Amino acid sequence: MMKSVGILGLGHYIPEKIITNQDMEKIVETSDEWITERTGIKERHIAAANQATSDMSFIAAERALADAGVNGEEIDLVIVATASPDHAFPSTACLVQNHIGAKGAAAFDLSAGCSGFVYSLGVASQMIKTGLYKKALIIGAETLSRIMNWNDRNTCVLFGDGAGAAVVGEVEEGLGVLGIDLGADGSGGSFLVQPAGGSRKPASAETVAANEHTIHMSGQDVFKFAIQIMGATSKRALKNAGMTPEDIDLLVPHQANMRIIKSASKRLKVPMEKVWVNVDKYANTSAASIPIALCEAEHAGAMKKGDTVLLVGFGAGLTWSSIVLKWSK
Ligand code: ACO
């Protein structure tokens, strides 16, 4: 019989420094009113100059391990979902593996934009279900402030930094991950892209001068995609779990934009009281947004054992991801 696999512990880390919409008004031509109305964002947190993605991952990881009551040595799989790793190589997951003392554990980064954490939960849960691994540490972490164009008001007001982590392992029968829907539409790749720094356009004085190492986004195209996919992928994951939207006790969506979150709530007919929202405080932290939201929701007592929790995200790729969990803690 296949094992039941779910989340054993959660932890997150938000850097101290806050940049409010009023601060953004001093950086680019924008207004608190525009940002609030179009996105719901009021402020975002930015990593300190000496903090990289791994540093935030370490803290989130230690908190998740403590929450689960698991030692680093017990972890045999480490996945870090990020679009802003410390280096192109080695992976940030290898840095985390070394930091927590998970000797010999498999470790790799996963690139699926803002869908990355839910993708990682999908991958880790299946590898544990089959018995290949026993306990995984999965992290969504981003230092997007380092790859933002601070002169581009179309993008720089939207993003923030942070990290969220989960320990994944065997849970009581019938609880944990019940339905998964992961997918992508690579034809939309150009809508959200960091054009330079890879093999297509290696770093050069020209690419730096042209700001090609920063996030380039066609906001309206991503918006249209997000509105359509959030409901569709959620319904598929629910169907895989033998459930319908009425069964949802808590919806934890990717925190990109309040209008996208409200549209998902409407399409799924899940009232906003059952939707966790923190985009106002942290803006879009990409792969970190769902684990941060999940961790905050748990600390606030928003779910109890046996509750049905739906995680749903979309992001660069373009990708989408949703997972239905019966809460197991
Ligand atoms: N302040 C003031 N005005 C602005 C700003 C700003 N910060 N940014 C853009 N504008 C202006 C534009 O220049 C434009 O002006 P114009 O009409 O004179 O040309 C006007 O506002 C309207 O711009 P739109 O792009 O049409 O605004 P829209 O309502 O589409 O909102 C937004 C833009 C918020 C980016 C929206 O499209 C969106 O949220 N898209 C989804 C983005 C997203 O979720 N991205 C993350 C994906 S996940 C990942 O993997 C990272």
Image: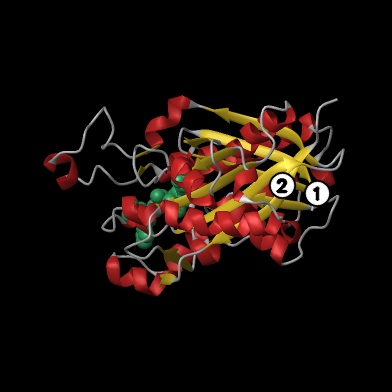
Q: Quadrant of the N terminus?
A: top right
* Residue indicated by mark 1: 328
Q: Position of residue 209 (x, y in %)?
A: 15, 47
Q: Is residue 135 left or right of residue 203?
A: right
Residue drawn at the location 58% of the way across and 28% of the way down? 183
Q: Position of residue 23 (x, y in %)?
A: 36, 73
Residue drawn at the location 80% of the way across and 33% of the way down? 241
Asked whether the viewer can see residue 82, the reply is no
Question: Relative to residue 321, is residue 184 depicted above or below?
Answer: above
Q: Residues within 10 Å of mark 2 (few under 14, many from 20)?
A: many
Residue at the limit of the structure toward the left, as seen here: 205
* Residue indicated by mark 2: 7
Which image quadrant for residue 160?
Answer: bottom left
Q: Secondary structure at mark 2?
A: strand
Q: Residues within 10 Å of mark 1 (few under 14, many from 20)?
A: many
Which image quadrant for residue 117?
Answer: top right
Residue kind at label 1, given as amino acid type: Ser
Asked whether the viewer can see residue 118, the reply is yes
Q: Is residue 176 left or right of residue 78?
A: right
Q: Depth check: 248 or 106 in front?
A: 106
Report, in whole angstroms, how far the alpha carbon at label 2 lies from the one at label 1: 7 Å
Tag of residue 303: none
Q: Depth check: 177 or 73 in front?
A: 73
Q: Position of residue 134 (x, y in %)?
A: 69, 36
